[in-house]
Amino acid sequence: MLAIGALLVVTGVQAYQIHRLTDRLADTDRRLIAGQEDSQARLDGLEARAKTLESEVGAAFDPEVIAAAALPSVFRVRAGRFTGSAFAVGESTAGGTNLFTNFHVVEGVWDDGDREVFLERTDQRFPATIVEVDKDNDIAQLRTTGKFTGLTAAPGAVKPGQQIVVVGAPLGLEDSVTTGVVSAFRKAKGGDPAAIQFDAPINPGNSGGPVVNGERQVVGIATAKARDAEGIGLAVPIGTACEAFDIC
């Protein structure tokens, strides 16, 4: 009887130990599963971050790429004795291509009652017509029968610090490219129209050329350089032009 009792005690102790061991194993399994889930969540987060970084690198500001995309759409404008810049915008149609420039570039021709100007690039010359003007905002719409790729207007407003490329024909030197940043957005005030201030170098002849962002979208139309100052260029917001002329 004593032997049987001892055996029962030993059996009970072993059963208790097995029960505790089973609990420990189950707890270990739960920890392993939780650790695996946490590791997977971290891995998923790292993969998402990697994709974001790849996207950001792919969209990095590259003036060479931006200029290559914009240059085929930009022309030197010859309006009587004056020259400036213009760029194709929107989609070309069977009737030709629409372009933007500054009103002051074509003002002499317009005031004389004439409507014909010329678009020039290297040894090519294309006649264009002044369709409509917005004197208050210094914008003019041109149209040519030639078909050219139009630049896309940026859908949103610019932000200070945004990098930009300005393309045009300063002093008649066509296909010129400069880079800089948006310094500020000047809202309309006291009768003055809204304007984009930027620090990319511009000169007479740049007027009417596009100011392009890193996504190869036009944010403005270069219009003036501040006198007796460096690094202060002004542009008409592309939204102003698109609202005035339904060609964007």
Image: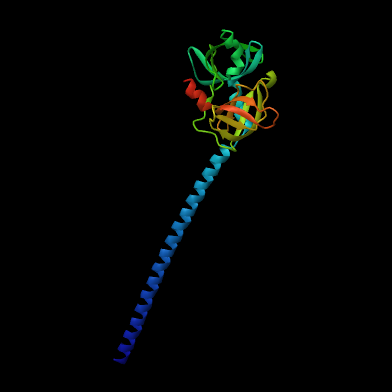
Q: Residue at x 55, y 32 (%)?
A: 215
Which residue is painted at 44% across and 62% down in the image? 32
Q: Quadrant of residue 216?
A: top right
- x 43%, y 67%: residue: 28
Which quarter of the picture shows residue 114? top right
Q: Nearer the viewer, residue 190 or 183?
A: 190
Please tell me whether residue 54 is drawn above or below residue 113 in the rendered image. below
Which image quadrant for residue 102?
top right
User: Is any part of residue 215 visible from this angle?
Assistant: yes
238 w.r.t. 59: above or below: above
Residue 163 placement, left or right of 9:
right
Residue 178 image offset from top left, x and y in percent: 66, 29
Q: Position of residue 179 (x, y in %)?
A: 65, 31
Figure label count: 0
The residue closer to the viewer here, 212 or 104, is 104
Query: Does residue 126 appear anywhere in the picture?
Result: no
Q: Is residue 67 above or below residue 15?
A: above
The residue sitting at the bottom extreme is 2
